[in-house]
Image: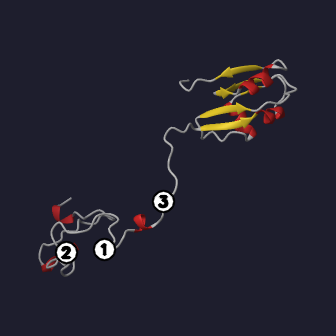
């Protein structure tokens, strides 16, 4: 293979070298057009600048706020646990399969008070006192899950 036989690989394009004379095709104004803020050295406007008019982000009304202390909890009512068979372990996976929990929230909280007819072992992050009472009454068990696990 000789030096004059070498060819550039297909699909590769050279870097656009602007401002290197008119023969390059990108000389004179170096693709920046004539005059104006964007043609000058260091020119251009910041993101969101709309030519001096009030920006859209400031024009539209603002409403509400983001509560940074809000806990990300999925609340499941105890009456929906009646659909599980007796002596079943009801954990987050079982709740996802049943369509009661999406899996997006960090914690599951069992709430409510009703007469369960089946003994279930329920694993969740939080329970209300009424829910604890309702699960333990027919002989069920409660297991609290720590977030660390």
Tag 3–tag 1 contact (CB < 8 Å): no
Q: Secondary structure at mark 3?
A: loop
Q: Quadrant of the N terminus?
A: bottom left
- In the picture, measured across the screen, residue 73 lies left or right of residue 99, that is left
Residue at 46%, 66% (x, y): give it.
Answer: 60
Locate residue 100, reporting x and y percent. Answer: 72, 39
Q: Earlier in the sequence, mark 3 or mark 1?
A: 1
Q: Is residue 77 above or below residue 142?
A: below
Residue at the bottom extreme, as displayed: 34
- Residue 22 quadrant: bottom left
In space, the residues marked 2 and 3 are separated at their CA atoms by 36 Å
- Residue at 57 percent of width and 38 percent of height: 72
Measured Cα–Cα span from mark 2 to mark 1: 16 Å
Q: Which image quarter holds the C terminus?
A: top right
What residue would you read off at disc 1? 51
> Residue at coordinates 34% horizontally, 71% vertically from top-left?
50
User: Label 1: few (<14), some or many (≥20) within 10 Å?
Assistant: few
Report the mark closest to the observer, 2 or 3.
3
- Which numbered disc, 3 or 1, marks the residue closer to the eye? 3
Q: Which mark is residue 62?
A: 3
Indicate the position of residue 19 as horizontal and vertical percent values. 14, 72
**Labels 2, 1: front one:** 1
* Rendered location of residue 69, percent (x, y): 51, 38
Q: Residue at x 76, y 26 (%)?
A: 130
Query: Closer to the camera, 27 or 102?
Result: 102
Q: Which mark is residue 39?
A: 2
SS under mark 2: helix
Mark sitting earlier along the chain (2/3): 2
């Amino acid at each position: 293979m000789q030096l004059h036989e070498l060819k550039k690989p297909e699909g590769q394009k050279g870097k656009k070298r602007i401002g290197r004379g008119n023969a390059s095709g990108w000389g004179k104004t170096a693709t920046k057009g004539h005059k104006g803020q964007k043609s000058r050295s260091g020119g251009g406007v910041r993101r969101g600048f709309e030519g001096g008019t009030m920006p859209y982000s400031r024009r539209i009304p603002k409403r509400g706020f983001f509560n940074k202390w809000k806990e990300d909890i999925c609340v499941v009512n105890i009456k929906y646990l009646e659909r599980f068979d007796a002596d079943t372990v009801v954990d987050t996976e079982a709740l996802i399969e049943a369509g009661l929990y999406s899996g997006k929230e960090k914690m599951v909280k069992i709430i409510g008070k009703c007469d369960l007819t089946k003994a279930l072992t329920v694993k969740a992050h939080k329970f209300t006192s009424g829910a604890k009472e309702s699960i333990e009454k027919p002989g069920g068990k409660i297991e609290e899950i720590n977030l660390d696990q």
